[in-house]
Amino acid sequence: MTHRITLIPGDGTGPEIVEATRRAIEATGVAIEWDVHDIGLPALQKLGDPFPKSALDSVRRNKVGLKGPLTTELGTGMRSVNVALRKEFDLYANLRPAKTYEGVQAPMGKIDLVVVRENIEDLYAGIEFDIGTPELAEVRAVIEKASKQKIRTDAAIAIKYISEFGSRRIVKFAFEYARTNKRRKVTAVHKSNIMKFADGLFLRVAREVATEYPDIEFDDRIVDNMCMQLVQKPDLYDVLVLPNLYGDIVSDLVAGLAGGLGVAPGANIGENGVAVFEAIHGSAPKYAGQNKVNPMALMLAGVLMLRHIGERDAGDKLERAIASVVKEGKEVTYDLKRDRDDPTAVGTKEFADAVIRRMKR
Ligand code: NAD
């Protein structure tokens, strides 16, 4: 079977790591027809529109996308491409596995964790009121009346909302992911001791959903305690499911524990099965066109993508090849060398060549 996948090269170093990843994925032997589309700045430059309908239609049709990083130009008034994609396809689940590979320096030793972050609700929903606006005065008056509490007049207000619907679908996603990927446990992370209603709702729903998955262990942790435990005893945890804000922070903590953003893959998954796979790092524009940066994070996103489309063996094969190259530590990019100025570091393309050779052995 040939899979059709939307390929978004991105900008900065994006096109180089996307090309390296495309070649590595093809070397697994899986038949893929790539539907290449620009979005963001390259699309704005070529087509005069950062979100061309043809690109969005392609993602909608193929349901699976592999995306290079995109530069968010400050001050152009252009919406963040990532936020726009998330809204367009209701990409409610942000999946960020964080695993140490031998050869990648990890500050606290071995970890193997998966962070599932709710992507739509919570403090990041974008419901904010700036000081000095009539809307703020209106909202403050309503809140003061309803809560019987005073809010200082020089305070801006951001709204945190957490729904039953949003909580249920993200926790279900975490359990389904755990089941499909043979993970043993899901931990719900919250602050319900302080935010009894919003986080309390998230925890209650998580407990309810957990009863539908008796084969998977469930527990919960308060977010501050979770952060400490992740540093001290990460092996007690497996899959973490969190509302948006905690998920954002904890997923970077966990990526750092695994060796940094340069080796961390991610996926945004939505209703109707639309899924966009990417590296967590940005477009590293200062290295653009230099064949220098590490394509490993995007290749690992490719591993997630292969598993997502049912090509589990190919995904495992690609992951083993990447792990083997990194473990050997010879044909790796500068960031994976002990000394970043090591002259034996290879380029983006040569790293991909090494991974491809491993798969042919
Ligand atoms: P960045 O992640 O692009 O780069 C920061 C530094 O990290 C680089 O200068 C480089 O030293 C290192 N680095 C990053 N990726 C690397 C790799 N693959 N291999 C080796 N080293 C690597 O972060 P930034 O400079 O803050 O962001 C640049 C642009 O990317 C911004 O416009 C930002 O908005 C955007 N961005 C996009 C995404 C995305 O598309 N998903 C994510 C984050 C940032």
Image: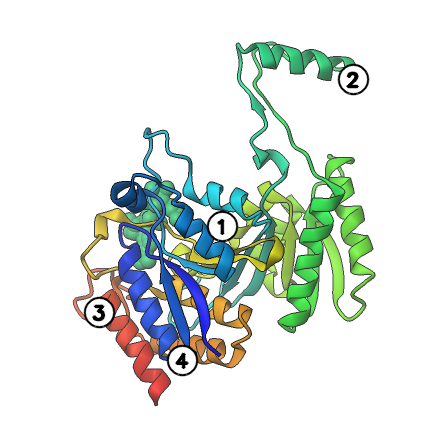
How far apart are the alpha carbons under marks 1 and 2? 36 Å
Element on which disc 2 rests: helix
**Which class describes the residues within 10 Å of circle 3: few (<14), some (14-19), or many (20+)?**
many
- The circle on residue 252 is 1
- Tell me the kind of residue under disc 1: Asp
Judged by depth in the image, the label closer to the viewer, 2 or 4, is: 4
Which residue, given by chain and number where applicable, does mark 2 sit on?
146
How far apart are the alpha carbons under marks 2 and 4? 59 Å
- The circle on residue 360 is none
- The circle on residue 346 is 3
- Tell me the kind of residue under disc 4: Thr
How far apart are the alpha carbons under marks 3 and 1? 27 Å
Closest to the observer: 163 or 220?
A: 163
How far apart are the alpha carbons under marks 4 and 3? 22 Å
Q: Is mark 4 within 8 Å of ligand 1?
A: no
Which residue, given by chain and number where applicable, does mark 4 sit on?
28
Q: Tell whether label 2 touches label 1 (CB within 8 Å).
A: no
Say whether disc 1 or disc 4 marks the residue closer to the N-terminus.
Answer: 4
Instruction: Answer with the quarter of the image where residue 15 lies.
Output: bottom left
- Tell me the kind of residue under disc 2: Ala
